Image (tube, coloured by chain):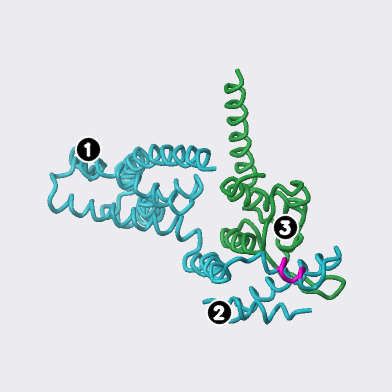
Chain colours: A cyan, B green
Amino acid sequence: MPDWQELVRQRLSGLALDSAETEEVHAELAAHLEESYESLRTKGLPEQAAMQQTLAQVADWQDLRRRIQTARAKENIMNDRVRQIWLPGFVTLVLTTCVLSLNEIFGPKPWILARDGNLPVAVVYIPWLVVLPLVGAMGAYLSWRAGGTKRAILSSIIFPVLPFLASILVALPVSLLFDHFIAHNIAPMSLFLSLPGWVLAPAVALLAGGLPAQFFLSRRLHSRRIAGS
Amino acid sequence: MIGAGIKRGTAELAVLSVLEGGSLHGYEMARRIEQQTKGKLRFTLAALYPMLYRMEQRRWIRGSWETSDSGRRRRCYRLTAAGKKKLSPLRQEWSELFRALRRLKKVAHA
């Protein structure tokens, strides 16, 4: 009987994986070939014919090597969660922050809602909110392109408001705790009321672009799958 | 005989379905698929393993080395929670496709 392990090692030489992984692939493919060969021999095929038929399972070893590498190595670089949530989320966060900064530097003054003589309740950057649907759509597209589930796509869309939400959620109890001692420096009510301007409004704007994009992309994928199959 | 394009599309569904019954190694997986589809779906080594590795990367299946009673070491794959979750929408998509094709056939015969 041929040495299948050696045969696979020779034919798949140059497999660009780490040594343990390469050994694992060699062993697995060799075991498969060995079982195929033994099964054919059990059916009564002569040694030579069984060997030929077993090896006929791989028409092009170089192509197989390339496809194994792509399947095992390329997708190792970034796992699904990074590609589907963190990377699109990071891109939308950076874009959101950049657009807000540009709006602050070059844009019109924000719309400020304040009670007479008190701290502002809400600061709304209208041009920023107008651009956010595009950012949301981009987040949805990046996550969808990486094969993200509905939940992953939704996370990517609203990712930019999460730091605002987290800051408010952390600052609010702290301000409530210390407000009694440093009365005029921290205003819990202002923090609470800043939720609509910094969290709810941007989230709605992001979703206004992201959700239609998700709907459109998933429909396109669905019809492409149906048509392409 | 089913054409190559359709086969590619059904391959993942076939693997997930056959693994639903329990963990299997690659050769046994290919053998069962061939047997259960009466030879309509046939996986060669070259077609099977790149797909298994890709599905493993996507965490739909998980492979681990096991030693059989005869002392032979094989890498057996089993369905993960993510794979189980993937199976039902995939089945739905394919049944929608077949329903659509049946409707087309009926229209053609009408």
The residue that label 1 is drawn on is A115
Residue A86 lies in magenta, yes or no? no
The image position of residue A169, as x and y in percent, is 41, 52
Looking at the image, which is closer to me, A157 or B53? B53
Q: In 3D space, how far apart are the residues under numbered discs 2 and 1 (Cα atoms)?
A: 65 Å
Chain letter belonging to callout 3: B
Q: Quadrant of residue A229?
A: top right
Q: Residue furthest top?
A: B110
Compared across the picture, whether A113 is left or right of B54 comes to: left
Q: Please tell me how crowded label 1 is: few (under 14), some (14-19), or many (20+) other residues with Cα within 10 Å.
A: few
Camera-nearest label, 2 or 3: 3
Going from N to C along the chain, the mark reached first, 2 or 1, is 2
Q: In 3D space, how far apart are the residues under numbered discs 1 and 3 (Cα atoms)?
A: 72 Å
Q: Amino acid at mark 2?
A: Asp
Camera-nearest label, 2 or 1: 2
Up-down relation of residue B67 to residue A217 (above or below):
below
Chain letter belonging to callout 1: A
Camera-nearest label, 1 or 3: 3
Q: Quadrant of residue A17?
A: bottom right
Q: Amino acid at mark 3?
A: Ala
Q: Secondary structure at mark 2?
A: loop
The residue that label 3 is drawn on is B30
Give the magenta range.
A49-54
The image position of residue A24, as x and y in percent, is 65, 75
Answer yes or no: are tags 2 and 3 on the same subunit: no
- For the point 58% across and 35% down, the residue is B97
Compared across the picture, whether B105 is left or right of B20 comes to: left
Numbered label attached to residue A18:
2
Looking at the image, which is closer to me, B1 or A99? B1
Up-down relation of residue B54 to residue A196 (above or below):
below
Q: Secondary structure at mark 3?
A: helix
